[in-house]
Structure formats: C-alpha cells, structure tokens
Image (tube, grey):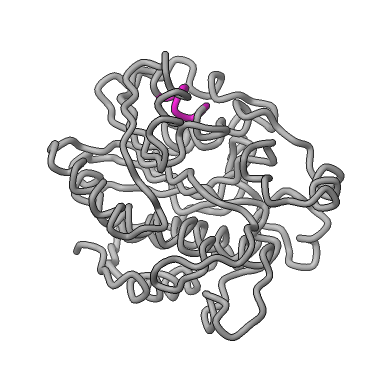
C-alpha cells in the first residue's frame, strides 16, 4: 500500500466535540458554507442518507444521489436545492463503472463522498460473481466506487470520504478465509457484522492511502434509526434491538456523517471510527455484547485493514490508482 512518512495515526479516542447523541445534522452544519463543493451520497434519498443530502445541499453543496430507482429517489429529494439523481446499483460492478465514468466525464472535483447505502440481514443472496450480497454491496461496491472516483477526489485537494459502519460490528469481524460463505453456513447477522467491520477497516486503510493526495477517511456509526434497513428483521429481533439501543431520528442519525464530512474539528485527522458526533472510544471484546457504544478492535486494526485492502482488490479485480 502507498505509504507517506508524514502520515500520523489519529488516536481512537473522544475529542470532546461538544456534540452528542441527540445532536442533529442541522446543528452540526450550522454556519458551514459548502458553496461550490460537490458531494456524492449513496442511498441519499431515504432515512439517514436523505437527511445527509438535505443538510449538505442546504449548506450550499451540489449533491449527487446515486440510486437504483431513479423515480423513487427523484420523488424523495424533490424540493431540496442542488440535488441531482443518477442511476447506480452497488451490487453491479458494471453499473458502478458506468456511474463513475459519467461523473468523471464532467471534470468536477469531488469534495465529499459519503458511502451511505447498504443492506442489512437479508436471506442469503449472491451477486453475479457469487459474492454474498451484504459484503458485496456494503463493502466491495463502495470500495470499487471510491477507487473509480479517485481522480475526482484527488482533484478536490482536501476531500473527505465517509463510510457508514454500524454497531453491527459486534456480530463479528471479517472472515478472510471464507468472506462469501462458500464453506460455512450463512448467518445473516454475522454477515452483516462482517460487512460493517469491513467498511470501518476500509476507512482505516483509505485514510493512510489517501493522505498523500489530500484525502481523509472516516468510518461512521449513525446510531440505531428506524429505516428501510429493518425490513428483514423479525419482531423478536426488533424487540431485542429496542431494548439494547436508544433509537435516533433520521436527522440525528445523519449528524455524525455530516460532522465527519464537514467539521473543521477534524482537520488533520482521519482513519477513525466515529459515533454520536465524536470519535468513538474502543470497547473491549468481552464488553461488546453488553455495551452499545464504542468500536471493537477488529474493526480498526491497521493490519487487518491492509489485509482487507488486498483481498478487496483481488475480489473486484481492480487496483487503486497509484
């Protein structure tokens, strides 16, 4: 991987941002002027993604919202200024390439990329390559998208990439020997945890990789939010979640993504897992099942991040531009 001697690892610990669990995206972005900035928010037309789009656009940014359903997305973002909807299916490599080519053809810098879209705990489904759908969509799709958009991120001279993780990392880390459940029985929660641990590890590696090009990366746990993500959860699973988490509104859930994408408090920092509009503390593995906040070590380990980077490049047949 690309190394830079000037790179300094950001401590995975609270910085006392002054915000908290109930902070909204509007409160985070108050006073921030994004006029002239360009952002992409995958899945930016529902739930946390929609509120992220709204906050960035209302601060002056031009926001591109990639979506599988152009009609649904266009309806959802109607009335929000400076928002453009484009077609993209993250589980389809050709669709990712096509979207990136259309964007790059405009010769625009990309100041903010928020890898927000995702799926959670569906029945076992595979993409055209045979890859498990959660790993393919939540991680590999965004890995490929980020790589393809790198020229535009580099051109921004100070871009930020925000990848949405989840407290689902508690279900487990990346199984490097069988990430696509080809030899082990499929467990939908474990697979979700793997995909979200992967998105966090991606931010760790990407920050180190992108530092020389002025690109910083962050992983975000938005908090538990009632959204389309819960559609595959049973009543029992949902009831258990409600006892473990204090649920947030979508606009509260968007706050940490918006903070990581825009806050001057994070200038010079990166490669960390954030939640509740601050950098998260590390939670010990023995406590992870009982404590909803904090990040598990397997989701921020730089050695695992490098290993995942190599695995991901191999699985999608694509090297990050050097």
Query: Above or below — where is 318 with respect to 52?
Result: below
Residue 54 is one of the magenta-drawn residues: yes
Residues in magenta, as a range: 51-56
Q: Which secondary structure class fits the magenta region best?
A: helix
The quadrant of the rendering that contains the N terminus is: bottom left
Residue 155 seen in the figure: yes
The residue positioned 49% from the left and 16% from the top of the image is 30
The residue positioned 51% from the left and 50% from the top of the image is 219
Tell me where residue 301 appears, x and y as whole percent. Answer: 54, 68
In-front residue for pair 9/177:
177
Which quadrant holds residue 202?
bottom left
Mark count: 0
283 on left or right of 310: right
Residue 263 seen in the figure: no
146 on left or right of 227: left
The residue positioned 32% from the left and 19% from the top of the image is 82
The residue positioned 26% from the left and 64% from the top of the image is 320
187 on left or right of 310: right
Which quadrant holds residue 4?
bottom left
In-front residue for pair 149/80:
80
Query: Above or below — where is 166 with respect to 303?
Result: above
In-front residue for pair 246/209:
246
Query: Above or below — where is 287 with respect to 315?
Result: above
Residue 277 is one of the magenta-drawn residues: no
Tell me where residue 272 appears, x and y as whole percent. Answer: 51, 52
Tell me where residue 20 appears, x and y as whole percent. Answer: 67, 31
The quadrant of the rendering that contains the C terminus is: bottom left
């Amino acid at each position: 991987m690309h190394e830079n001697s000037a790179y300094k690892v950001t401590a995975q610990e609270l910085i006392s941002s002054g915000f908290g669990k109930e902070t909204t995206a509007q409160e985070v972005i108050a006073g921030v002027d994004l006029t002239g900035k360009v952002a992409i928010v995958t899945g930016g037309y529902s739930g946390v993604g929609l509120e992220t789009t709204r906050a960035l656009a209302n601060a002056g940014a031009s926001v591109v919202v990639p979506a599988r359903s152009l009609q649904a997305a266009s309806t959802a973002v109607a009335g929000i200024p400076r928002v453009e909807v484009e077609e993209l299916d993250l589980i389809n490599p050709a669709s990712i390439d096509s979207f990136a080519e259309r964007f790059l053809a405009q010769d625009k810098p990309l100041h903010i990329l928020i890898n927000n879209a995702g799926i959670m705990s569906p029945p076992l489904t595979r993409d055209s390559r045979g890859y498990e759908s959660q790993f393919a969509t939540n991680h590999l799709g965004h890995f490929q998208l980020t790589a393809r958009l790198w020229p535009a991120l580099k051109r921004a001279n100070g871009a930020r990439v925000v990848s949405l993780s989840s407290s689902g990392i508690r279900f487990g880390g990346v199984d490097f020997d069988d990430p696509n459940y080809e030899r082990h029985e499929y467990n939908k929660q474990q697979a979700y945890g793997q995909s979200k641990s992967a998105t966090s590890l991606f931010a760790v590696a990407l920050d180190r990789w992108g530092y020389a090009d002025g690109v910083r990366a962050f992983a975000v746990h938005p908090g538990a939010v009632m959204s389309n993500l819960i559609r595959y959860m049973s009543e029992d699973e949902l009831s258990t979640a409600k006892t473990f988490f204090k649920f947030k509104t979508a606009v509260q859930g968007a706050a940490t993504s918006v903070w990581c994408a825009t806050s001057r408090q994070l200038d010079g920092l990166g490669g960390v897992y954030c939640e509740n509009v601050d950098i998260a503390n590390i939670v010990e593995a023995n406590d992870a099942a009982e404590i909803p906040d904090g990040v598990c070590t397997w989701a921020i380990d730089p050695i695992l991040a490098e290993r995942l980077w190599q695995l991901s490049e191999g699985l999608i047949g694509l090297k990050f531009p050097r």
